Amino acid sequence: MERLVDTRARPLRSLRLSVTDRCNLRCAYCMPEEEYAWLGRDTLLTFEELHRLARRFQALGVNRLRLTGGEPLLRRELHVLVRLLAGLGLADLALTTNGLLLAEQAQALKAAGLGRLTVSLDTLRPGTFKQLTRRDRLEDVLRGIGAASDVGFGPELKLDTVVLAGVNDDELIDLLAFARERRAEVRFIEYMDVGGATRWSRSQVVSRQQILQTIERANGRAEPLPGRGSEPAERFRLADGTTFGIIASTTAPFCGACDRARLAANGTLLLCLYASQGLDLRTPLRAGVSDEALDGLIRGAWLGRTARGAEDRLALEGLRGPSRALDELRRAPLLEMHTRGG
Ligand code: SAM
Ligand code: SF4
């Protein structure tokens, strides 16, 4: 296996594979608009194509893979893809989902070899859920989380919460307690000005520091845990043993340790969540390119990688607003968080 490093000496280690740009929620921080431009169905990579690309990335150093979207559980027969990918023997095979369809699929995903599961859960209040996602489906998410614990995802279960001022920032302690009861771990995420977050404003961001203050005020000191490595989340432990994470991409970016490539569902390789451009791998793939040539394309992209999107955004400080205008997103849907695979 190669050890590729980019221009900032960052190795290629992890891959986020988006399997669809479709979603069954409309989260205010991700898809606030009424209308979207979708990727053409025939441009979505097949399971065989996704598997082949995952193998090439593995040969170039990737040992952690996460399936995402859009909502990945909308992709029909997803467990079949999971089984194919599990056969690669990667150190980590994970999935991020909004949980709506999880109750029906948890068993099949576990049986197919999925290692870890992250469910997005921003609130425990049905009214807030409906306001935030434009769908009245909190019950389904909670059933999904229950099913995931029942089939044995247990300690490998994470709950991701985007914290928004005035929306769910009064629920941090309840979410911690909810997770503790299910032996899951919450990760509080700062609201990011990614493409798609067209309503982003600095005033709605609840910072890492504010999140920690709220938790420590209620639960006592949160001790930082060592061993973060290239993980986006900083982890903490409370006196009662509860652990939680904070992902502070907005106020304390971790670009310097970012070892992550992303593949949009149409086979576009993106080297940063904020990247304006990607590299089309679908066209060569469908033209019958050899493994060596595919490796060359990926290798070349990674060697030239300079990405530091979140740091660049932070440098704007007071001038910060949504990173992409709506008309730009309409013209180039790949700039959307839900299309490139958040
Ligand atoms: N649909 C799945 C889900 O929601 O878990 C997977 C895709 S979603 C784009 C992946 C993650 O991105 C979710 O945890 C979501 O909360 C997060 N996300 C989306 N927009 C965000 C934003 N503006 N700031 C921070 N996190 C965001
Ligand atoms: Fe919400 Fe995930 Fe769908 Fe975005 S892709 S609207 S975060 S469920």
Image (cartoon, rainbow, N blue to C red):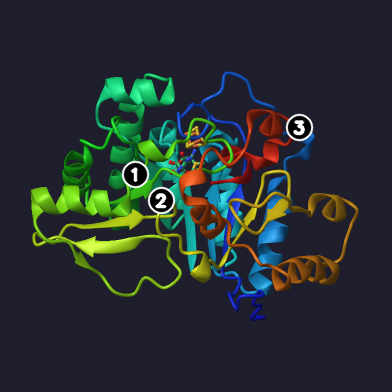
Looking at marks 2 and 3 on the same chain, the residue that comes earlier in the sequence is marked by 3
Q: Is residue 333 left or right of residue 27?
A: right
Q: Is residue 15 above or below residue 318?
A: below
Residue located beneath label 1 in the image: 148
Q: Nearer the viewer, mark 1 or mark 3?
A: 3
- Residue name at image x 51 percent, y 57 percent: 315
**Corner quadrant of residue 103:** top left
Instruction: Tell me the amino acid under the disc marked 1.
Output: Ala
Asked whether residue 152 is in view, the answer is no
Q: Is residue 117 visible?
A: yes
Where residue 184 appears, as percent x and y from the top left, is 26, 51
Q: Which one is nearer the viewer's eye here, 90 or 162?
A: 162
Disc nearer the start of the sequence (1/2): 2
313 up-or-down from 162: above or below: below
As displayed, is residue 232 above or below residue 337? below
Q: Are marks 2 and 3 in contact (CB under 8 Å)?
A: no
The residue lying at 64 percent from left, 29 percent from top is 326
Q: Where is residue 265 drawn, in percent x and y?
A: 67, 44
- Please, what is the three-letter code of the amino acid marked with disc 2? Leu
Residue marked by disc 2: 117
> What distance separates the C-alpha of mark 1 from that of mark 3?
32 Å
Residue at 41%, 40% in the rendered image: 202
**Disc 1 or 3, which lies upstream in sequence?**
3
